[in-house]
Amino acid sequence: MAGALAAGQGRQGLDRHGGDPIRTWRPRPLRAIHTCETTELSYRTMIWISRFDGDEVAARQRAAADGPLHGRVFAVKDNIDVAGLPTTAACPALEGRVATRSATAVRLLEAAGSVPLGKTNMDQFATGLVGTRSPYGACHSVFSDEHVSGGSSSGSAVAVAAGLVPLALGTDTAGSGRVPAAFNGIVGLKPTRGLVSTAGVLPACRSLDCVTAFTRTVAEAATALDILAVFDPADPWSRPAPPRPPAHVAARPRVIGVPDGPLDLDPEHAVAWKAAVEHAARLGPVVPVPVEDFLAAAALLYGGPWLAERWAGFGALLDAAGPHADPTVRAVVTPGRDITGAEVFAGLDRLAALRRTTEPVWLDIDALLLPTTPGHPRLADVAAEPVVVNARLGQYTNFVNLLDLCAVAVPAGFRADGLPFGVQLIGPAFADHALLDLAARWTGEAAAAADPAGTTLLAVAGAHLSGLPLNGELVRLGAALEFRARTAAGYRLYRLPGPGVPRPGLVDTGDGPAGGIAVEVWRLPQHAVGALLGTVPAPLGMGRVRLDDGTEVLGFLAEAHRVRDATDVSSAGGWRHAAG
């Protein structure tokens, strides 16, 4: 089984969909797991650091609580406490540290009826994206025994991809819940920071750490999030989910941002990325966006003061002499010992500036689409240049936690050499459920939802857009952003003369830009339509607006004969970029 597969060939129990090459493959049914014996497949010998006895697991399954996961087993990354098993973070010096109480995330899954099977291998102290920095052995991809599994949550991802468990917990500071998902053809959910408790997790970089979920489908990931997203007073970094998503988060995300320039990608990845962007265009509008500041933030994780936080978390163990510490992890983290307070605050200031420059992106798009990694290295590549290869893997993942974003990694077909290719959908904080809805559409799992009774969809193109002066009128009337879209071709946008808040006029002239005009479609109670109409001055009124997908919704329109003295700003593509 050496090497990658020939193009189009499935591996290790995973079957591909026909038709659209981006649609995820369907996993075969899970193995009936009552024992944990090693199989003939080499990667399975590297999955586990510790496990419960098979008979004990079976007994726990029989006694499991009733719930949505009744009797199902799950795996746990070995930096997360499971009562009765040691928590080593892949450091043999910690093998005597047996947990007496499970982490909050583990206890929530158990309360839902699931049973922990064991603790999985990982890059030591969750410092790495390759899956090779472990004295317990290196995992490899289930698709190739020559290519890395990804890390640091290597064993958890491989356990799901191999069909041993339907769900595994990992952690993600720099991409550890997404990179191994991409390299093994599964789903990796990285929630908003603080949404899932990290109590009972041995920290890597505590202010950034997230507990993540690996699953075979987006639906399973959504179920896991529903169970895990509970505010935990025992975790000082825990944050309660808001009662409703932020106003700029669409309930039905459609508009996907893609980088407006070239990316650093290996040739095989570049071909697969082009197909992924084409697939995104079949789901809704695709908008080019600048990503330089996102990538600049990514460089801060290991090029800035956050190394000091890693040193504070586990540096004493690395400082001690002995073979227990992975030499690459020690070399990477030890410089954190010498970072000064002034450097920490300079880094925080730089991050705040980058956060401010990237925030406006989320007013134009629902999700940012990026490759999860720039390539898929071989084990030999990592051995030759362990720091350089690992650092390159994080350039599209490192920024997500630093900028307080959420993400979900999803399969995106196969490369020509048979290795899986993965992408990540990234959104603003607390857009987790909306992002999962978009991910389900990406994989073909989504079913059409019925429109709530007693509501109306309304397209807005100007001052009522989220973040603009009149958006509060919509929110006060109980409206919520449903989705972003563009009009059908043929509409023009005008800046209307007059005092007060600048307003646009959207007119169906028949000769507008082929790409349409950017709009937001809000869902509001039907009784609120009349109240809103009463606030709209002439020459604006309401009529039917055709969208880029061929549907029609109610929207603000201007009378064509009343815009003769107005300025045509259609070339801006939307009011947000024309209003200034």
Image (tube, rainbow, N blue to C red):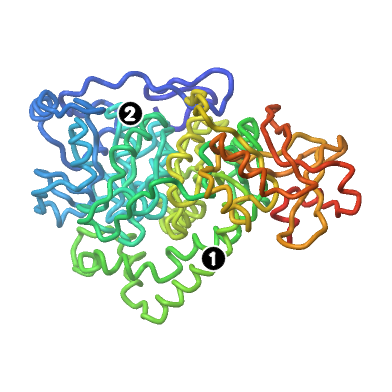
Q: Determine whether the residue tagged by mark 1 lies in a helix, strand or loop.
A: helix
475 versus 423 height, above or below: below
> Nearest the camera: 566 or 36?
566
Q: Is residue 53 left or right of residue 394?
A: left
Kind of residue at disc 1: Leu
Q: Earlier in the sequence, mark 2 or mark 1?
A: 2
572 versus 455 height, above or below: below
Q: Residue at x 34, y 33 (%)?
A: 223
Q: Position of residue 508 (x, y in %)?
A: 82, 37
Q: Disc 2, disc 1: CB below 8 Å?
A: no
Tell me, yes or no, if residue 267 can be seen here. Answer: no
What residue does disc 2 label? 162
Question: Where, by quadrant of the figure, is residue 158 drawn?
Answer: top left
Q: Quadrant of the N terminus?
A: top left
Q: Position of residue 480 (x, y in %)?
A: 52, 43
27 versus 559 height, above or below: above
Q: Position of residue 128 (x, y in %)?
A: 37, 54
Count of marks, rendered view: 2
State how far apart marks 2 and 1 are (Cα).
Answer: 39 Å
What residue does disc 1 label? 354
Q: Position of residue 87 (x, y in %)?
A: 17, 50
Q: Residue at x 76, y 40 (%)?
A: 516
Q: Residue at x 58, y 19 (%)?
A: 19
Label 1: how many residues lie within 10 Å, few (<14), some (14-19) or many (20+)? some
Q: Is residue 39 left or right of residue 564?
A: left
> Nearest the camera: 502 or 345?
502
